[in-house]
Image: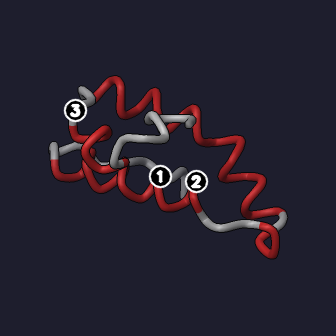
């Protein structure tokens, strides 16, 4: 629900986004990524899965994603 409609395939939805929209979608995932990291036993990894797809699409578009490390 954070980056795509629940009834739409996530990859299909993400592939329709522009590069700035992908960055914005990634930013919207940060809270969920933190929650999954802090409590992995109650997580299904949905936020990490979506973030990985976004980062892959950005890389495919020629944008290297800065992880801050």
Q: Are marks 3 and 2 in contact (CB under 8 Å)?
A: no
Query: In the rendered structure, which disc, 3 or 2, sits on the residue that comes first in sequence?
Result: 3
Left or right position of 11 against 31: left
Query: In the rendered structure, which disc, 1 or 3, sits on the residue that comes first in sequence?
Result: 3
Image quadrant holding the N terminus, namely top right
- Neighbour tally class for label 1: few under 14, some 14-19, many 20 plus, Cα within 10 Å: many
CA gap between label 2 and label 1 equals 6 Å
Q: Are marks 2 and 1 in contact (CB under 8 Å)?
A: yes
Left or right position of 10 against 6: left
User: Which residue sits at x=24%, y=26%?
Assistant: 18
Left or right position of 9 against 57: right
CA gap between label 3 and label 2 equals 19 Å
Q: How is the image coloured?
A: secondary structure
Mark 1 sits on what residue?
Answer: 51
Left or right position of 54 against 57: right
User: Which residue sits at x=57%, y=58%?
Assistant: 46
Q: Residue 15's spot in the image, x, y percent?
A: 22, 40
Q: Residue 43's spot in the image, x, y percent?
A: 73, 66
- Neighbour tally class for label 2: few under 14, some 14-19, many 20 plus, Cα within 10 Å: many
User: Which residue sits at x=61%, y=65%?
Assistant: 45
Mark 2 sits on what residue?
Answer: 47
Mark 3 sits on what residue?
Answer: 16
Q: 65 or 12: which is nearer to us?
A: 12
Q: Is residue 59 above or below residue 24?
A: below
- Neighbour tally class for label 3: few under 14, some 14-19, many 20 plus, Cα within 10 Å: few
Helix, strand or loop status at disc 3: loop
Helix, strand or loop status at disc 1: helix
- Which of discs 1 and 3 lies nearer the camera? The answer is 3
């Amino acid at each position: 629900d954070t980056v795509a409609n629940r009834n739409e395939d996530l990859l299909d939805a993400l592939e329709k986004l522009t590069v700035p929209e992908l960055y914005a979608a990634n930013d919207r995932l940060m809270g969920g990524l933190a929650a999954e990291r802090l409590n992995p036993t109650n997580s299904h990894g949905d936020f990490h899965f979506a973030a990985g797809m976004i980062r892959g699409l950005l890389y495919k578009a020629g944008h290297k994603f800065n992880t801050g490390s």
